[in-house]
Image (cartoon, rainbow, N blue to C red):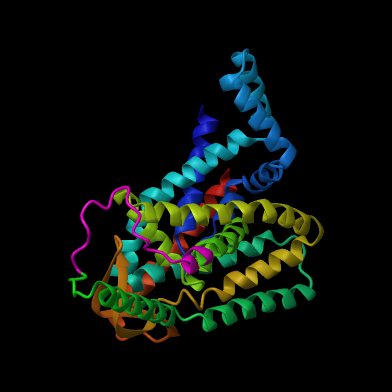
Amino acid sequence: MLRWFKEFFSGFTVGAANIIPGISGGTVLFLLGFYERTMAAVNNFKPANIKTVLRCAQKSVFGNQRKEHQKQLICHMRALDALFLIRLLAGAGLAILLLSGVMKFLLETYFTNTYAFFFGLMTMSTVMALKMLKVWKRLYLIHLIAGIAVMLLVTVSIDPSVNAKIKSDNYKSRLAAELVAANEITCPNNAPDGAAFKYFRQYTGRDFAAIGFTGVVAICAMAMPGLSGSLVMILMGQYHEVISAISGLKSLQLDYFVFLMIMAIGMGAGILIFARVISFVFKRFYDGTVALMIGLTAGSLYALWPFKGTVVIDQYIKHAGQITLVENAVIQTNKNILPADAASALSALLFCAAGAGIVAAMDRYSRKL
């Protein structure tokens, strides 16, 4: 029972890490000693094994000798280490549900200090990741530089303020078209009553395609030690959309369920492919792969710099199926700036130190274990 609780709590820790841009869920798995086991368990989910489990599950519910089939089902699940994965995923899912609303509030209300905390987490995570290297060669310096260059290129090329402006303009055009079609002006601030179990077409087909692809890429990043899946979502302009959808689940609006389900399908497909690739690459090119990942981690520090340039726009958003206008919305850009005053710099430094201290404490605890 204690082992089950440890696995569930480890999953909770990984889920919490995946919400936070800057700390890698794969790194947490590695520090907790579950990384190789998790990848091996995912690799066990091959078509033949899945068919066997589904057949046993069907017979255990509808068959004649249910108890016997139930025992066989448990044996198959243990052989595939599926029960371990279930406990791990249950803990991660609970953490994401509980903490997504908190993260949304922090980013909207305390952006600079929150990002400073993330910056400290990632800085110390990068330092700790160096311990994963078994042998250092000069060739790996090229891998390191390549990882930094790729991450800087991605970060500079994706401006969240531009994405927000494009989406706002699309909503503005759609609102104008709706008003013309209805031949009447309605107040966009009056959200429809009874959003529960209703589908408002809040997301377009393009949004669904984008989140499905984001799910594929993000799960690969989450599974890779040293690279943050949440950071990848930020770079792809989907992080705020995802945590908003998770936070909105409590309204029981179907749009959020469909949006997250499509993301989950993308993540499922991504992890099944990635687990095989990462196992192959780690076995044959371990140190070179780790050096590349450390470079990606170091390059992501540019994206996590807590002081960003901002733009102010009149932003159109969609909530509960209704397009509304938010006047003078402050949107962060991808341009890094210096702190405006000493007080904000000191505050950010303290939060940065706190983030670095947490990672250092986790590393010390893992070494004791």
Q: Position of residue 236 (x, y in %)?
A: 51, 71
Q: Position of residue 313 (x, y in %)?
A: 30, 84
Which image quadrant is residue 369 in?
top right
313 sits to left or right of 258: left
Residue 104, placed above or below residue 324: above
Is residue 204 highlighted in magenta? yes
Residue interval drawn in magenta: 189-209
Q: Residue at x 44, y 53 (%)?
A: 258
Q: Position of residue 146 (x, y in %)?
A: 69, 78
Which image quadrant is residue 136 in?
bottom right
Q: Position of residue 165 (x, y in %)?
A: 38, 81
- What's the magenta bit mostly, secondary-structure-wise? loop
Residue 55, placed above or below residue 27: above
| Residue closest to the eye, 259 or 13 | 259
Residue 99, placed above or below residue 142: above
Q: Residue at x 49, y 69 (%)?
A: 206
Q: Residue at x 36, y 81 (%)?
A: 169
| Residue closest to the eye, 83 or 10 | 83
Is residue 328 highlighted in magenta? no
Is residue 74 visible in the rendered image? The answer is: no
Number of numbered markers? 0
Is residue 217 visible in the rendered image? The answer is: yes
258 sits to left or right of 177: right
| Residue closest to the eye, 177 or 8 | 177
